[in-house]
Amino acid sequence: MSATLLFAFVIGYFLLLLGVAWFTSRNSTNDSFFIGNKSSHWLLVAFGMIGTTLSGVTFVSVPGTVGDFTAAGGHKAFTYFQVVLGYIFGYAAIAYVLIPLYYRLNLTSIYNYLDHRLGRYSYKTGALFFILSRTVGATARLYLVINVLQLFILDALGVPFIVTAAVILLMILLYTFEGGVKTIVYTDTLQTSFMLLGLIVCIGWILSSMGLSLGGALDTLGERGFTRIFDTDPMSRTFFLKHMVGGAVIALTMTGLDQEMMQKNISVRTMAGSQKNIMTFTTVLVVVNFLFLLLGGLLYLYVESQGGLLAERQFLLAGRNVIGDDLFPYAAMNLLPHWVSIVFIIALISALFPSADGALTALTSSFCIDILGIRRREGLDEAAQRRIRMTVHLSLTAVFMLCILVFKWIDNKSIINIILDLAGYTYGPLLGLFFFGILTRRRLNDGPAVVFVCLLSPVLCYLLSRNAPFWFGGYQIGLELLLINGLITYTGLWALSTRGEPTA
């Protein structure tokens, strides 16, 4: 497959996004950028959120986990689906606990809740933890897809990685600069459509080429041990209770307490529409994640039929280890027909943009509203707010570039594991702050001590995670680290609080 031809499809796709951005950003205001003028249709938001949640990490990394190995030496198989089942409980809590709260307070930034309920230090601390969490998570996802495009297209054209990253960030900047959320609701819908089309096409072609029905494929995968969902070993990092509780908390924090995700939800006109959006999105997300795991199993079967050897924690084909994140891109670009390679590239870049454009917009919104307070400062008219917003948007694009280069330097084989591990540390204090505000009626003595508690909690969690196998007879902490982090923060805030009526 010609790298030049594939690159032409990338450029054509970007021009399509620019056209959508131009059409949707006409007559945009700061309210359009921050909350889409609260006029987004719930069904568009629900569909677009699928692409944002899945991103390039799910598209590339989740299929690769199926044949990857656990610490005990067995295949991970479909154990990731335990996390997905946990999502259901987390999203239900968002729909029926958090959404009513956000609409009651008529929030533009969800972290304004912390200001209402706990105080200014808690508010600023929560916003800063979101900015840190989303910056790290979004750039990790972005790096993964940029690296795939670099390896399979841009290297052949002699384009350096740093140039590829800079150009893609410039593309994202161009189509989010004016419209913000108003534009992203539509571009995410377009991109989710292409991503799901790529998933279905790849599954269909592999089933057809191997002469398998869906039922026959599941039987074959089951015989190989690839369809195991539940891990019943309590000492394992993938024990089903750890994964399901972790999945629920991840959904609650990385969606419900995340300005990027909730910015789109609160752009829906009514609370009922926003709740329908969340529950519809949840149903589709569960099905789509199962299809990605199915694709992963099929890819391992197909590559083995082409000479691949899965053994000793490696999956070797022609002398190259293609296990994990490398599996899907390698198969799509080297073993599947050219037209399927084109579909894969379009689907991959469709997975790339939703994970970055929304993050860049939400981070800009949070920094402007929560840290700089442009909505509260007197003397700032619409034009002055717009100048500040654009300066922040440009500055955050530069920060994204630096983070991508750091991930390139780390060059880990499984980005999804990095993202989930980092989320346990960075989202934990946010979870503790919101839990304390919602679940108690105590008055917090808001001040610098709150910042100290929120910084100390991840440090204690790191020490606990590193030493748990030695302290607790081989027990390994997995996704429950996020919940532990939140509980430590909650306990620290309780110690700083007194009885009395809360401020909100």
Image (cartoon, rainbow, N blue to C red):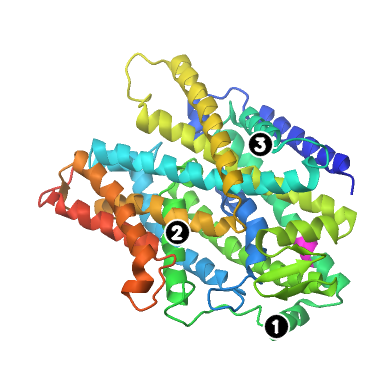
On the image, the x and y values in percent for residue 435 come to 29, 55
Res 150 → quadrant: top right
Residue marked by disc 2: 250
In the foreground, 453 or 371: 453
Name the secondary structure under disc 3: helix
Mark 2 or mark 3: whose residue is earlier in sequence: 3
Q: Report if residue 191 is visible in the image.
A: no
Residue marked by disc 1: 224
Q: Compute the Cα span from label 1 to label 3.
A: 39 Å
- Residue lying farthest left? 499
Q: Compared with residue 152, is residue 319 higher up or lower down, i.e. above or below?
A: below
Let me know if residue 201 is in the magenta part: yes
At 66% from the left and 75% from the top, the residue drawn is 312
- Give the amino acid type for the residue marked by disc 3 in the picture: Ala
* Residue count near mark 1 (Cα–Cα under 10 Å), binned few <14, some 14–19, many ≥20: some
At 41% from the left and 43% from the top, the residue drawn is 130
In the foreground, 216 or 491: 491
Residue marked by disc 3: 165
Q: Compute the Cα span from label 2 to label 1.
A: 30 Å
Q: Report if residue 482 is visible in the image.
A: yes
Left/right of residue 402 with respect to residue 441 in the rendered view: right
